[in-house]
């Protein structure tokens, strides 16, 4: 009897998939986060590729926004007509790459999708999925356990990826309703003397920190540090000053 597929998760999240290479079989599913540094050197694309945003990052390495964008776009470059690309409808940088999509395009969006566009979107507080003639209401956005509007977008992206990979709606809903986040990404550490501590140390660009700050309504004491990557700080400083 053929064994069931195993799922491996890794890449640019602290656990390289090369650690599991000996265990992996041809029909297994690999879920990868790939950095622009890695994409720069790649000559193969995943069957399902998702680009969540293209905003300034790693300019100390890539030099210009053009070369950084070109590196990110390589995730689509080697796809075939049978493959699927998932792009954010709300992020200008990601959406501008739609002419590079060689197979099917799915979008994810904070608003209802344009006619003729398939993917996931938010409408009247509900997460929805549309694929040709099929239209499904998935779940209310308030059921997302993660803080911040950006995390609702991340869940919409995850539904689009799962659907593209052929996962059923029920298992995806089960996973989404139970998901409480990953280490270092707006991770709740503990409450001490009435103060809630959060670890967002994986936020390595101003836009990421801004999304985290916007996830809070209560007063914040912001502890911020790191190495400069030749990025613009103006908007983050303005938001922090508020």
Image (tube, rainbow, N blue to C red):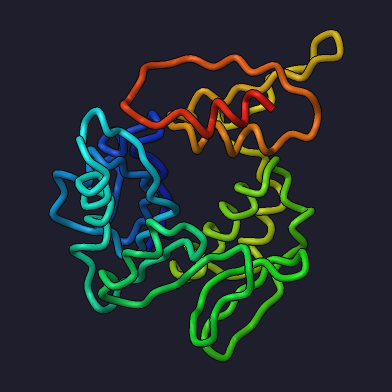
Residue 70 image position (x, y, % from top left) = 21, 52
Q: Position of residue 51 (x, y in %)?
A: 39, 56
* Relative horizontal placement of residue 241, taking residue 75 as reference (left or right): right
Q: Nearer the viewer, residue 178 or 236?
A: 236
Residue 134 location, x and y as percent? 59, 86
Q: How many marks?
A: 0
Q: Residue furthest bottom?
A: 133
Asked if residue 206 is positioned above or below residue 34 in the image, the reply reads: above
Q: Is residue 196 above or below residue 33?
A: above
Foreground pick, 220 / 40: 220
Residue in the image at 34% along x and 70% along y? 98
* Quadrant including the N terminus: bottom left
Q: Is residue 32 left or right of residue 196?
A: left
Figure quadrant of the C terminus: top right
At 35% across and 64% down in the image, what residue appears? Answer: 96
Residue at the extreme top of the image, as rendered: 193
Q: Residue at x 23, y 59 (%)?
A: 45
Closer-to-camera residue (212/27): 212
Q: Is residue 25 left or right of residue 121?
A: left
Would residue 71 be seen by someone viewing this image from the given angle?
A: yes
Q: Is residue 92 above or below residue 7?
A: below
Q: Could you tell me which residue is drawn at 47 percent across and 61 percent down?
A: 88
Q: Quadrant of residue 110?
A: bottom right
Q: Answer whether residue 1 is visible to the viewer in this image.
A: no
């Amino acid at each position: 009897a053929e064994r069931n597929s195993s799922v491996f998760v890794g890449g640019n999240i602290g656990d390289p998939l090369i650690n599991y290479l000996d265990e992996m079989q041809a029909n297994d599913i690999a879920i990868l986060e790939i950095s622009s540094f890695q994409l720069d050197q790649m000559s193969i694309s995943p069957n399902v590729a998702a680009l969540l945003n293209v905003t300034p990052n790693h300019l100390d390495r890539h030099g210009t926004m053009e070369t950084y964008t070109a590196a990110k776009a390589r995730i689509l470059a080697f796809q075939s007509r049978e493959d699927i690309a998932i792009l954010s409808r709300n992020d200008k940088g990601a959406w501008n790459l739609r002419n590079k999509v060689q197979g099917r395009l799915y979008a994810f969006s904070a608003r209802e999708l344009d006619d003729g566009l398939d993917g996931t979107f938010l409408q009247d507080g509900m997460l929805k999925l549309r694929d040709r003639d099929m239209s499904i209401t998935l779940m209310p956005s308030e059921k997302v356990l993660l803080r911040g509007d950006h995390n609702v977008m991340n869940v919409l992206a995850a539904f689009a990826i799962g659907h593209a990979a052929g996962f059923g709606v029920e298992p995806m809903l089960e996973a989404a309703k139970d998901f409480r986040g990953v280490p270092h990404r707006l991770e709740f550490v503990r409450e001490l003397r009435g103060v809630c501590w959060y670890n967002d140390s994986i936020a390595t660009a101003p836009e990421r920190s801004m999304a985290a700050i916007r996830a809070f309504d209560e007063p914040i004491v912001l502890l911020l540090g790191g190495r400069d990557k030749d990025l613009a700080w103006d908007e983050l400083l303005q938001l922090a000053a508020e």
